[in-house]
């Protein structure tokens, strides 16, 4: 039963990524019509924006007081312990695998990949 629920979670995750990509393509298309700007550049910019937001929201809080990266004096001359504590902190404070933040990250990466051929066409056209 656990495998079936895991497969359905993966399926929903992929569906959410595809839906977000379709939304990014539609927004880029409307933006290119309204602004009279190149579709590929808008799609690339939207992809970078979505991937950046997904990355920022999905990572642990870098300004937290209990983050080992902010406790320089505690780990003075103990780099191995600091590295182990940083890895543990990241694992404990990161988001779940199929969260919406990861959907944004992967949809943004796919939008960047979809926008890249348009940018290459602009770069190599005469």
Image (spheres, helix red, strand yellow):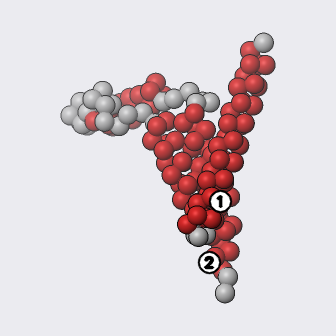
In this view, the residue in front, 37 or 106, is 37
Q: Count residues near mark 2 (Cα–Cα under 10 Å), then give few for <14, some for 14-19, many for 20+.
A: few
Q: Residue furthest front?
A: 34
Residue 124 location (% of width, % of height): 66, 80
Q: Residue at x 76, y 25 (%)?
A: 7
Is residue 11 shown above or below 125?
above
Which of the image's four quarters has the C terminus? bottom right
Q: Please tell me how crowded label 1 is: few (under 14), some (14-19), or many (20+) other residues with Cα within 10 Å.
A: some
Q: In the image, is residue 109 above or below residue 84?
A: below
Residue 84 in sight in this render? no
Query: Which residue is pictured at 51% across the width and 29% down the height?
Result: 95
Local secondary structure at mark 1 = helix
Q: Is residue 4 left or right of residue 68?
A: right
Residue 25 falls left or right of residue 62: right
Q: Secondary structure at mark 2?
A: helix
- Asked where in the image residue 29 lies, by quadrant, the reply is bottom right
> Gap in Å between the C-alphas at discs 2 and 1?
20 Å
Residue closest to the eye, 76 or 14: 14
Mark 2 highlights which residue? Answer: 123
Q: Provide the residue designation for mark 1.
A: 29
């Amino acid at each position: 039963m656990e495998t079936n629920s895991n497969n359905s979670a993966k399926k929903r995750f992929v569906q959410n990524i595809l839906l977000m990509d379709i939304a990014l393509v539609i927004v880029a298309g409307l933006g290119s019509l309204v602004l009279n700007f190149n579709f590929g550049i808008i799609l690339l910019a939207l992809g970078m924006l979505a991937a950046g937001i997904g990355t920022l929201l999905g990572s642990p809080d870098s300004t937290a007081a209990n983050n080992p990266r902010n406790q320089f004096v505690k780990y003075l001359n103990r780099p191995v312990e600091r590295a182990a504590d940083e890895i543990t902190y990241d694992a404990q404070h990161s988001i779940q695998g199929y969260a919406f933040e990861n959907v944004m990250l992967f949809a943004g990466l796919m939008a960047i990949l979809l926008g890249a051929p348009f940018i290459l066409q602009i770069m190599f056209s005469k």
